[in-house]
Image (tube, rainbow, N blue to C red):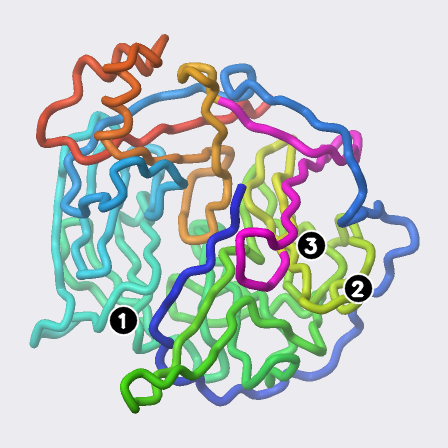
Amino acid sequence: MMKRWLLLLPMMGGMACQSPTETTDVSERTDSISTVDVYADYPMKRLDISELAEVAYLPLNKKRLIKNRSYHGTFTGNVSENLIVSYTFDGDVEIFNHSGQKLHEFNHQQVNEEGSYIGIHALSADEERQEVWILDYDHSFKIYALDGTYRRTLKVPESLNVQTMRNWSEDSLLCYDDHLVAEGLSRNAYPFYLFSKRDGGIRKLTSVRVSNRINHSERFVLDVGGTRQVLNFTLSVSPLAIGGGRAILADFAKDTMFCFQQGVVSPLFVRKPSVFASLPFVLGSVDFVTSHHLFFSFAEKTQGNNSFERNLLYDFETKEVTAYQLLNNDFEPCLSLPVNSWKSNYPSNWLVNEMSADRFLQYHREEKLKGKAAEVAEKIRKTDTSVLILYKFHDK
């Protein structure tokens, strides 16, 4: 699927980082692991999602209107076994159950009270603790009860910057640090770490050491009416994905992708040629993980519709690599599914897509829906703004 360049205002200024003590880098020991050729012509697999996962459709009445009425993409937010948490860049947080009923909503953005946030950079929800975790632009986590009651704040250490976070365990978030001084330079050589939900303590995964970092963004200066403006273009590639009891770690500057499971980091496979073999860089992305497969991709770090991209599938048991199309046959023609969940938190083995209610109903009016999709289309209310499509992949 197409990797999108997003035009963003620059983040708040980076923070000074300190270099950890040097350790042995297991990523260099790659003699006996599999190899993935970035440019190889791998055979194509057409995957019918109904054979791999249970499929459910859930209309929602969300505050965040989808401006693109033909939108279909991965859901940005948090999904757990019983809850769905959606948020807007205006600071609105909405919590639904899996029947589509809105349970709570709140907004503490830039209000003059304890526990207010500047803005929501990312969000995670802990169903067991009944908490919503908001990553604020001041580099702290603001934690709330589901009804929006403020509970506490945990500061991110000044040596780190959280770019990506995933629910890892009852006690920890698994995070990725993207603080870069400049392309190729970083004061933090260990980008993956566990963040304690109890006290904000840090445990770096020192098995993955990255000497020369690569950013997935480009910063440039424009002269607009005589005023200099700094803008960022960000390629939507993900260095971290969780599923099937494992995490896949893929720093953009590493040729090796790693598996983190039961407290141990081990090499999964090595790409060739090296990421440093060509300019512009071709970055690897871990898009989605199930118990059986890794969906991953490569994308050229450049603007334009003709840039190089590959979407590949890795089988954990056979170590086979193929190209793939993941298709939903409830739509005519078959709907190709996006899997890049870089801004989302889902349960293990779940993928969640979102489609505008307008587009979903357009399929229905044209009689291009069947099965469960057609049944749900009959029940969509006028107030519904989107339809979540929940794919729960089989564990066995």
Q: Is residue 64 above or below residue 377?
A: below
- Callout 2 secondary element: helix
Q: Quadrant of residue 224?
A: bottom left
The amino acid type found where label 1 is placed reads Thr
Please give left or right for residue 223 compared with residue 130 in the image.
Answer: right
Q: Residues within 10 Å of mark 3 (few under 14, many from 20)?
A: few
Residue underneath mark 2: 26
**Residue 150 in sight in this render:** yes
Residues in magenta, as a range = 300-327
Count of numbered circles in the view: 3
Q: Residue 62, percent across and down? A: 17, 41
* Camera-nearest residue between 315 and 308: 308
Provide the residue designation for mark 3.
Answer: 264
Q: Quadrant of residue 18?
A: bottom right
x%, y% of residue 306?
59, 52
CA–CA distance in space, label 3 to label 2: 11 Å
Crowd rating for badge 1 (residues with CA inside 10 Å; few <14, some 14–19, many 20+): some
**Residue at 30% over, 89% down:** 227
Disc 1 to disc 3: CB gap under 8 Å: no
Q: Which residue is mark 1?
A: 153
Reply yes or no: does residue 323 show up in magenta: yes
Rendered residue at 54%/41% (across/down): 1
232 magenta-colored: no
Q: CA distance from mark 1 to mark 3?
A: 30 Å
Disc 2 marks a residue whose amino acid type is: Val
Q: Residue at x 58, y 58 (%)?
A: 239
